[in-house]
Image (spheres, grey):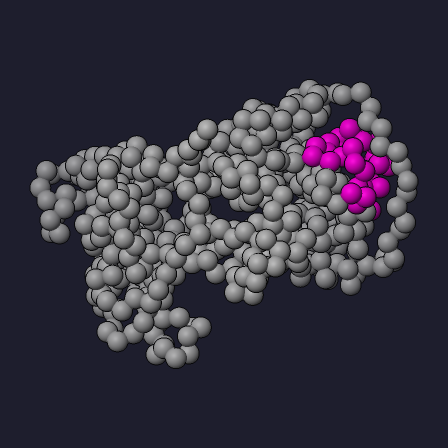
Amino acid sequence: MSTQAAAPVATPLVAPPARQHPGAFALVDGNNFYASCERVFEPRLIGRPLVVLSNNDGCAIARSEEAKALGIAMGAPWFRIRHLEQQAGLVALSANFSLYGDMSQRLMEVAAALGCGQEIYSIDECFIDLAGVPDASARARQTRERIQRWLGLPTCIGIGATKTLAKLANHIAKSAERKPGSYPARLAQVCNLLELSARQRDWLLQRTPVAEVWGVGPRWAAQLQAHGVQTALQLQRLDPALARQRWSVVLERTVRELGGLACIGLEQAPAPKQQIACTRSFGQPVTELDDLRQALSHFCSRAALKLRQQGSRAGALLVFIRTSPFRPQDAPYARSLVLPLSPPSDDTMRLVGAALQALQALYRPGYRYAKAGVMLLDLQAAPPQATLDWGAPDEDGGDGEGSGRSQRLMQALDAVNARFGAQALRLGSSGGGAGPPAPGCAEPAARPWQMRQQRRSPRYTTRWDELWQVRA
């Protein structure tokens, strides 16, 4: 196959009359999602270069188009771009995951009305099943306008016969809006490949580098380019058997999907996770055992909640603590320990108790710990009743894994926190600074193990004491 990409054919993009397609997918994607969420409540940020920083304000994990224009790369360390605050008016904010998660849920609820099925792919992307939906382009534009009007979030929507083509159409819709001339302007914001002729689709695929195809990572892209496959069209015309033999069945599936054969179905219910982890780098070095106890209690409580939400129980628990590998002046230390849980458990108190038992064995005084975490392993579907409930406490003073009392206690814990905010009700071992303050009380002082978020915006939609205030 020739390594020279064929010159694009100048084909006018005139859509035929709208028709109903028996099989189609849409991809709804929020543009620069984290930055857009911040701008909803701070209009003064519109038009200004904006980055959102990672945990502990370490590096840029989201960039507005204006920030990208300054040459700021994804993952750029904050200390290397900090000078742009003064030189270019750059605004940097700490990650506000409470806000982003809530805005994501609202986005997904509005987007779901576009079709008859939804798969939430990431915090800002979802696939929609458009099978049998008439006038898909008009519906997509209405949905996009509704999201913009109701939530203030800009989006782009791509439509194709397969999920891979829908993802590609979304790339075209975004690029046509952000980079004039890269694709026809009429495909900006909403791009429906099903409305185009085969020749027009080939013209678009020929303009798209192979690295932009969903599922083709940098390593495969380099190998494909060395093999003479430079564009999405050339990948579409690659022999599927060769793709499977030389690369993998995953690339074979991508080739077939580019050709219009749906090989990846909609996953409306995500598969249960095989492991659940909660790990954090500390805002400052931690030396005291009590601070580590609070941190691991908090992390384990969060992991236990996720465990119950997916209806599983953990058969083992891993705990680790370590110093920073980036501070050579500190003595290095890194240890982990796995404890089996018999019977498997989803009880926060039992999981936290096991984590603190492991910490006692792991902790060594004299070190400056920088990170800790827990991982729940050997996850199993939670049975209605694992053991008979004899109404007597177990050896640890609890009620046994089959105890209705234990289950009711966890249900009450989750219900209170769902209503009044995460960690409103928590174990005493997690300390007093992990959750929201009591009504009428000031924000509790940050613990040494908590993340450094000196630039975080208010959690406008999830905290009563941080509601958006409008002044005349």
Q: Is residue 69 above or below residue 30?
A: below
Q: Quarter-wise, where is residue 204 in the image?
A: top right
Q: Residue at x 72, y 39 (%)?
A: 177
Q: Any magenta on residue 200?
A: yes
Q: Is residue 261 visible?
A: no
Q: Quarter-wise, where is residue 145 in the image?
A: top right
List x then y, in percent, for residue 351: 25, 51
Q: Is residue 282 left or right of residue 344?
A: right
Q: Is residue 276 visible?
A: yes
Q: Any magenta on residue 361?
A: no
- The quadrant of the image that shows the N terminus is bottom right
Q: Is residue 393 above or below residue 220?
A: above
Q: Is residue 227 left or right of residue 405?
A: right
List x then y, in percent, for residue 261: 71, 37
Q: Residue at x 36, y 61 (%)?
A: 282
Q: Which residues are magenta?
A: 180-206
Identify which residue, 92 or 338, lies in the foreground.
Answer: 92
Tally of marks? 0
Q: Residue furthest front?
A: 472
Q: Residue at x 48, y 61 (%)?
A: 58
Q: Residue furthest left?
A: 392
Q: Is residue 181 left or right of residue 265?
A: right
Q: Residue at x 79, y 55 (%)?
A: 230
Q: Quarter-wise, where is residue 361 in the image?
A: bottom left
Q: Is residue 176 left or right of residue 330?
A: right
List x then y, in percent, for residue 120: 53, 37
List x then y, in percent, for residue 179: 75, 45
